[in-house]
Amino acid sequence: MTKFLGIRREDKNKWEARVPIIPQHVAELKKNFNIQTIIQPSKIRAFKDEEFTSAGATLKNELKECQIIFAIKEIPIDFFESNKTYIFFSHTIKGQKFNMPMLQKMMDLKCNLIDYEKISDEKGRRLVFFGRYAGLAGMTDTLWSFGKRMESKKLDTAFNEIKQTIEYGNLQDIKNHFLEIGKKIKQNGIPDTISPLVIGISGYGNVSKGAQEILDVLPVKEITPNELINDYDNLSNKIIYKVIFKEEDMVKPKSINNKFELQDYYNHPEKYDSIFHRYVPNLSMLVNCIFWDYRYPRLITKNFIKKSYSEDFKLQVIGDISIDINGAIEFTEKSTTPDCPSFVYNPITGSVIDGVEGEGIVVMGVDNLPCELPKESSKSFSNTLIKFIPEIVKADFGGDFSSCNLPKSIKKAVILYHGDLTADYKYLEKYL
């Protein structure tokens, strides 16, 4: 018997050209599993409608025949239909206030919700993600912001030549251009007024690895957080220094009688204080790639930056790839879009001005960075998702949750089942 899945068009903004399932996999699902795809037409998607129809998909505005619907970003409230299963990044697991009405609507309609972010293996490692591409685009846009910031200060550097991610044709174009920029850095060095140039990266997961993949195309040397503090005066002006910060570098136990233990920090973050402020004076840029919620200490607070800021403050740009509003970087006041990716936060007045000019620190805060590499990021995402699609589409959602025959990795990601919060997500009740 033919099974149907639906693919919703992305319309959160004009930049969202990604798709969860690429045409190649639409054809494979039809041929190998007798799964028929119905996809909404889109004028902005990285893959054209004709590519999907050529792969065997049916183009329709309505997805009424589909009990299983795949998307990427949050879905408008009026799109949901009762008793259907939706798979997308819901951005609800932290109790995000702006998405609670959407979650409540899904509950009212007795929907099932599977969140990509929670599909994981037995060790809790995510299996379906765009993280690498967030890092790739995020580092590119952070370095672009830095170049524009230097240009606004009338300082000529090789970074001034860097373009924004969306201005390159593809990932290889970015890397080829960065190789040329790297040659100029090796030859001409970095101006003494901003040397040594140090880029801190908080975190070491998929997002961080993507960010490092781009940065490492340039002439880079990695140093430890300890070396950043103790050997700072011995650093060269013909190289970029990279510092990776792990949890033990960023926090310490509040009690002097306790030692740092990673699992204890995950379980009881309230027992720890941030020590990240000790590194900030020696950083030129910071790229934030960590998972954060309200329980964890912040990396940089408004109070710290207000007390520390001066005209010759070294930290010029923060690439907040994690983009938690008023989160790990407390003065990330808003998310941004590719057509206006950065703003300047003034630590003294607390004001925010779009662009890279003005007194303060530049924050790059694009909230859907992988959409700047839409075709490549969609291919990568679909390559991992395809492994799970047949089991999701052919699963029996009719009985209770305990008898649902989804694989364990997917079951962990079921936030709603028949409109009810599953056991792992009961904590969300307090946010509704």
Image (cartoon, grey):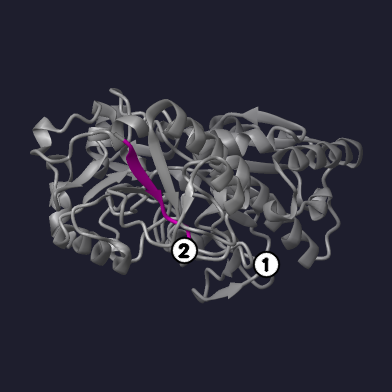
Please indicate, yes or no, whether residue 397 appears anywhere in the rendered image: yes
Mark drawn on residue 331: 2
Q: Amino acid at mark 2?
A: Phe
User: Quadrant of the rendered structure where residue 3 is?
Assistant: top left
Mark drawn on residue 157: none
Tell me which residue sits at (64%, 52%) in the image.
Answer: 142
Left or right of 137? Residue 174 is right
Q: In the rendering, at what x and y percent does residue 340 appear? A: 62, 67
Picture layout, residue 247 above or below residue 373: above
Left or right of 25? Residue 407 is left
Among all residues in the image, which is located at the extreme front? 1
Among all residues in the image, which is located at the extreme right? 187
Q: Which quadrant does the C terminus fall into?
A: bottom left
Give, as a single range, the part of the protein colored magenta.
2-12
Q: In the rendering, at what x and y percent does residue 215 appear? A: 68, 38
Badge 2: residue crowd in 10 Å (few <14, some 14–19, many ≥20): many
Q: Which residue is mark 1?
A: 356
Q: Secondary structure at mark 1?
A: loop
Q: In the rendering, at what x and y percent does residue 328 appear? A: 41, 52
Left or right of 415? Residue 299 is right
Please indicate, yes or no, whether residue 260 appears anywhere in the rendered image: no
Q: Amino acid at mark 1?
A: Val
Tell me which residue sits at (57%, 53%) in the image.
Answer: 49
User: Quadrant of the rendered structure where residue 266 is?
Assistant: top left
Among all residues in the image, which is located at the extreme top? 122
The answer to if 9 sits in the magenta stretch is yes
Badge 1: residue crowd in 10 Å (few <14, some 14–19, many ≥20): many
